[in-house]
Image (cartoon, coloured by chain):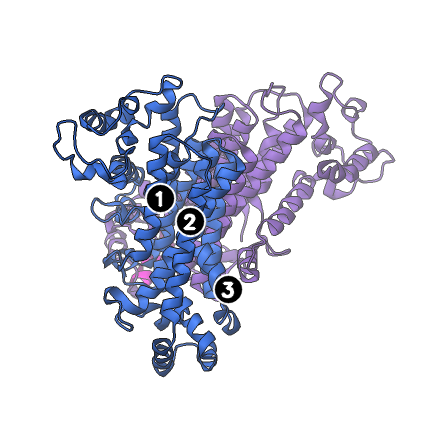
Chain colours: A purple, B blue
């Protein structure tokens, strides 16, 4: 019911669209139930080249943005999550729902990527497990919700571990409610994630993928906290940790969507690769922004990583050019003069530039994974794939 | 294979037993696979009145203790858990396995209760889901493992929250490895619990029960941490919190065993009630021991509850006799003179005595739940039921 209600305005917009061909306006006669759930994206089929309505009036710009078109589903996910975190104890509801309040849900990149991926891999495949595509779409939304719950739970626990004061431009939960309640709120979100997974997905492989992603998050944090001086100087160690901490969740969730769809191993692997490279590219840009901030000038960022003794790609690349930096990195950054010296070497090096190139390389590998998907002539599939590829560019060009 | 290997010495002991009737030595001809997994307990069928072997030689005393007979399974659970917590990062393995090392696994009451409950409710029921009783027994063991994982995870997080220095007579994990790694180790155990539940049990209702138990643990801790002065004086609030913190896990796990067995709602409810009352009785005795220690004299315990501002049943009963205590409890126990005054009122009151009576009442209700199970003439069922009832007495008579 919700799905139908959600799509009525989108369908109306679709019917207004002059650029849409007659065939795209009609359900696929061979497979009506299959298309039913996806009408919302059919208006994209001409890409960005036909932005006028039937009457020659420009179409509402929102409708040309694939991300805008899934916003209703993403909003529904946000609403559902707000009701999911309601607990018996009002204080627990308050703590668990802290990052799900309207307006502070963050960029909601995970649900966006997962819903686009679900559309991008939709092909005429027989799925014996599920009755309708609408039901399958609901399951994708559950994967997105579980992923967000795990993500936010890990943010809350990370903030406790790091004694972080802010998150998403506001006070961290540990600052507002104390470390103890923050630990419990994170636990509660994990319970919600796993119970939703077990009850709503009923697919052992998918639940295992999500559990593995969570295990990787914990492992990544552990790698960070138990790092030795030698490991701190290793690019391999850094990339492995980055994968675990930032890319494992989205990559395994992307794969989970493909598995739920009953896709082939090849498609599931490509979905995984997209998430993996997107996540790593995202983190590499984050590492740069920690040094540059929005200004793109070195030293204008918060420098929070280096002040916490966390060594990231820019410094590791600088170290390749200036082996003298090795000793400083091994010593750590408790001594502020080590921070100054490292920043000086970094400024002289191509560390930032090379990190950006590496991020671009991962963004390209993510886009390649999308290009590697089986051919499709379906417009909604193609436009979703394009949106996923655009997202890789958007993420690496971001300045905040 | 493991199940068979495990039972060979027990079977040998059984064959030595003079007191075992011929019928009990043979598999039930009507239902061979059904009995196969439970031969290990058939030697108990005469209770404790026939403790001589076929040759008139006393049987090894160990074999007359029902708890001793499931010790092989409990040991297997311990071994499995040690291998389950092996992580990619050695430090994580060390942290997650801290309480699973040989010799420091604690009393392992949860696995013991669950395996006895599994035997106690075994009846000639058709279970369409599972091929063999051995497979079902393996699933009970998974429930026991998951319960232990959730239990230990909550202990680790509780110790972080309470800044506890010791646990099971040794340094707490947060003392040994720091709070941060302890939080992550707890998270890792939760991941193991939920992924085992999802992958090995494949039963939505059972997974939901275990997830609910975990949610209750978090809720109970939250109730403790956000308690108001008025709530601190309420016996109802105390009992609700006690249920969540101590009894919800074992009661829901007992129910999970019954659900896995394909039992009726009535039997599942009785299993749940047994766990619920056993857990509450256990905690009430724990509350007494915090005041008396092993000596049974007031003030000889660690008094850790009251020093942490936690008000338990003995004080709440004393407050009924001495309303003056109400104001002190509302004020809390930051002021040491309030602790002294409360102890004085407690000494004059029947608080300890009434708490013991309440514990005995819950122990009786637990035993009543066992007596309420459908009649059975099966010796291994009867002896398991007796063991569960004996356990209620053992728990309330304990002095440590």
**Could you confirm whether marks 2 and 1 are on the same chain?**
yes
User: Alpha-carbon neighbours of circle 3 within 10 Å: few (<14), some, or many (≥20)?
Assistant: some
CA gap, disc 2 and disc 1: 9 Å
Residue situated in front as seen by the camera: B170 or B310: B310
Q: Is residue B297 magenta?
A: no
Kind of element beneath mark 2: helix
Q: Is residue A143 above or below residue B125?
A: below
Q: Is residue B173 above or below residue A285?
A: below
Residue situated in front as seen by the camera: A83 or A248: A83
Q: Label 1 near label 2: C-beta < 8 Å? A: yes
Q: Is residue A340 magenta?
A: yes
The chain letter for the residue carrying disc 1 is B
Residue A316 lies, in percent from the top left, at 33, 47
Residue B29 lies, in percent from the top left, at 36, 17
User: Alpha-carbon neighbours of circle 1 within 10 Å: few (<14), some, or many (≥20)?
Assistant: many
Residue A75 lies, in percent from the top left, at 66, 46
**Could you confirm whether marks 3 and 1 are on the same chain?**
yes
Residue situated in front as seen by the camera: A376 or B68: B68
- In the drawing, does residue A334 fall left or right of residue B277? left
Residue situated in front as seen by the camera: B14 or A300: B14
CA gap, disc 3 and disc 1: 28 Å
Q: Which residue is mark 2?
A: B366
Q: Which residues are magenta?
A: A338-353
Q: Label 2 near label 3: C-beta < 8 Å? A: no
Decide if residue A158 is in sight here: no
Decide if residue B87 is in sight here: yes
Residue at (74%, 40%) from the top-left corner?
A6
Q: Quadrant of residue A97?
A: bottom right
Residue B360 lies, in percent from the top left, at 38, 57
Q: Which residue is mark 3?
A: B237
Q: Which residue is mark 1?
A: B388
Q: Quadrant of the N terminus of chain A?
A: top right
């Amino acid at each position: 019911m919700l799905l139908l209600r959600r799509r009525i305005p989108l369908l109306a917009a679709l019917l207004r669209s002059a650029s849409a061909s007659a065939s795209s306006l009609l359900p696929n006669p061979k497979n009506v139930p299959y298309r039913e759930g996806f009408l919302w994206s059919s208006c994209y089929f001409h890409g960005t080249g036909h932005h006028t309505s039937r009457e020659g009036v420009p179409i509402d710009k929102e409708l040309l943005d694939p991300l805008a078109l899934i916003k209703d589903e993403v909003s529904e996910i946000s609403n559902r999550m707000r009701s999911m975190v309601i607990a018996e104890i009002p204080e627990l509801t308050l703590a668990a729902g802290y990052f799900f309040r309207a307006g502070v849900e963050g960029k909601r990149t995970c649900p966006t990527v997962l819903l686009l991926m679900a559309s991008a891999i939709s092909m005429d495949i027989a799925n014996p497990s599920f009755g309708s595509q609408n039901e399958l779409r609901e399951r994708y939304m559950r994967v997105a919700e579980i992923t967000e719950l795990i993500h936010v739970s890990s943010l809350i626990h990370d903030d406790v571990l790091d004694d972080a004061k802010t998150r998403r431009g506001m006070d961290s939960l540990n600052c507002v409610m104390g470390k103890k309640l923050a630990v419990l709120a994170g636990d509660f979100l994990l319970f919600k994630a796993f119970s939703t997974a077990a009850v709503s997905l009923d697919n052992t492989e998918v639940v295992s993928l999500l559990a593995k992603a969570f295990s990787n998050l914990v492992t990544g944090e552990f790698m960070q906290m138990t790092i030795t001086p030698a490991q701190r100087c290793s690019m391999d160690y850094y990339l492995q940790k980055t994968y675990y901490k930032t890319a494992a969740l989205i990559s395994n969730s992307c794969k989970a969507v493909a598995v739920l769809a009953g896709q082939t191993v090849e498609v599931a692997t490509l979905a995984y690769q997209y998430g993996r490279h997107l996540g790593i590219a995202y983190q590499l840009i984050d590492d740069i922004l920690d040094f540059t901030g929005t200004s793109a000038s070195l030293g204008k960022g918060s420098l929070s990583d280096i002040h916490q003794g966390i060594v990231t790609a820019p410094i590791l690349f600088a170290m390749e050019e200036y082996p003298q930096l090795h000793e400083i990195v091994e010593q750590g950054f408790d001594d502020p003069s080590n921070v100054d010296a490292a920043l000086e070497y970094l400024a002289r090096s191509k560390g930032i530039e090379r990190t950006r190139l590496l991020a671009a390389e991962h963004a390209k590998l993510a886009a390649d994974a999308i290009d590697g998907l089986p051919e499709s002539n379906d417009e909604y599939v193609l436009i979703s794939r394009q949106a996923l590829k655009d997202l890789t560019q958007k993420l690496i060009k971001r300045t905040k």
